[in-house]
Each structure stands twice: as structure tokens, then as C-alpha cells.
Image (spheres, rainbow, N blue to C red):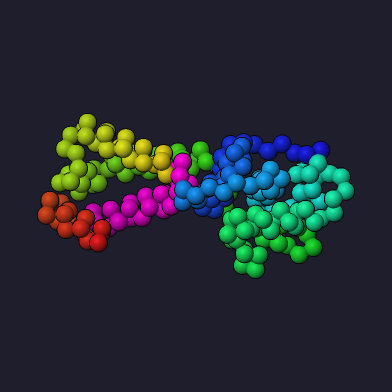
Amino acid sequence: MQQSFPSSPFLIGNWVIHPGRREIVRHGQARLLEPRHMDVLCALAARQREVVSVGELLDACWGGGFYGDNPVHKAVAVLRRSLEDDARTPRYIATVRKRGYLMIARVRPMRGVEERLEAAIRRWGSSPAFQRRMRVLGPDDDHGWQTLTAVLLRVASTLVTDGALPSALDTVDEARGWLSSQVAATPVDGQSTKKALSSASA
């Protein structure tokens, strides 16, 4: 019997997967998959870092029956092209000889990552050190900081929609690291802050 897969979005590596729409999205570019190909992708993702045999994929995605293993191999080949993966040096789907296929990329639920990004932005935006160093360029009262945080969250939401969420998380982490280095290395005054911000954006 053919398995039913969830329709909630999730992440595989730096791709956002929309099973219900049969789309994979990265950097704002969407690619449409055939239903069975999306089923195979979901089946491999559901058993991340476990070897899934050809027979198991046939049962889950084709509902059993006699098909041979050819449709599975074709589906994996299409998925690799869609994900820009390479069978010889895989980053997403690895072949385990005589055993099956293995999802080696990190699989994460979308909502958990959205919550992490939102928490990071709120924590970063409310940091006294960040506010001191942004005071010369940013808001000068609580209402202004609330507005800035709201704008940042709106940007985060857009990044999620456009499939750039993994890059956004990396950027937030890098920005937090840069801020920490500035807190340790520079005195708190407007001139130093302007100089540090200019050098960081150069």
C-alpha cells in the first residue's frame, strides 16, 4: 500500500521542501517535482541517515506490485539533478551499494528553524551591547527598537518564503559573532561605532 506523506514544509540541507506543492526552493528559485519523486524524497528524509532499500521505496512510493527497481533509480537520478547533487561526491543522497539509498544531508522541521531565527533576532535586537553600538544609526527609544525588531522579523519571514532561510541563520550567527568581537574590542562611543560598522560593511 502506498504510504501517505506529510504536507508540512521542512528543510533538507539548504533546500526548503514543500511536499504539498511538490516544490523544492532555494535562494528564491522553485523547482517542481513529480508526485512519485517527491514521495521518494520524503521517504528518504523521514529516515535520515538510515539506509532505505529499493524494495522499501517501491512499497512506500509505488504501493508495492512488480516494478523492478528501475523506477526508484530513475527517481533518485531526477532528485539528484533537481538538488544539484552528484552521485560520486554526494551532499544529499548517497548510494549504498547493494543496500539502497541514504539521505546524508541534515533534515529539519521548518517551524523549529523559524522559531530559532525569530528568537535569535529578538535576542540580538534586545541586547544592550547591540543597542549601544547601533544608537548612532538606529532608534533612540523603546518604540523605535520594537519597530526595528518587527522589521527584522518581517525580513526573516520573507527569507523563509523565498527559501533563503538557511543562509539567514548563518548570517545571524555571523553577525552575533561580529558583535561580540566589537563589544570586546571597541570603546562605547559614537565615533568608534561608526568606524566599526563601516569596516564591517566594506
Please give left or right for residue 135 compared with residue 44 in the image.
left
Q: Position of residue 36 (x, y in %)?
A: 71, 45
Magenta residue span = 160-184
Query: For the view shown, which residue lies furthest in the right direction?
Result: 66
Residue 127 shows in the view: yes
Q: Position of residue 109 (x, y in %)?
A: 55, 42
Please give left or right for residue 110 compared with residue 148 in the image.
right
Q: Position of residue 2 (x, y in %)?
A: 78, 39
Q: Is residue 170 above or below residue 154?
A: below
Residue at figure coordinates x 60%, y 55% from the top left? 82
Please give left or right for residue 62 compared with residue 24 in the image.
right
Q: How many marks?
A: 0
Q: Residue 144 sits in which quadrant?
A: top left
Q: Residue 6 sits in which quadrant?
A: top right
Q: Nearer the viewer, residue 69 or 48?
A: 69
Residue at figure coordinates x 22%, y 61% from the top left? 199
State which quarter of the image contains the C terminus: bottom left
Q: Nearer the viewer, residue 118 or 180?
A: 118
Residue at figure coordinates x 58%, y 59% from the top left? 84
Q: Nearer the viewer, residue 150 or 26?
A: 26
Q: Is residue 53 above or below residue 60?
A: below
Query: For the view shown, which residue lies furthest in the top direction?
Result: 143
**Magenta stretch mostly in which secondary structure?**
helix
Q: Is residue 182 magenta?
A: yes
Residue at figure coordinates x 63%, y 47% from the top left? 33
Q: Is residue 48 magenta?
A: no
State which quarter of the image contains the N terminus: top right
Residue 92 shows in the view: no
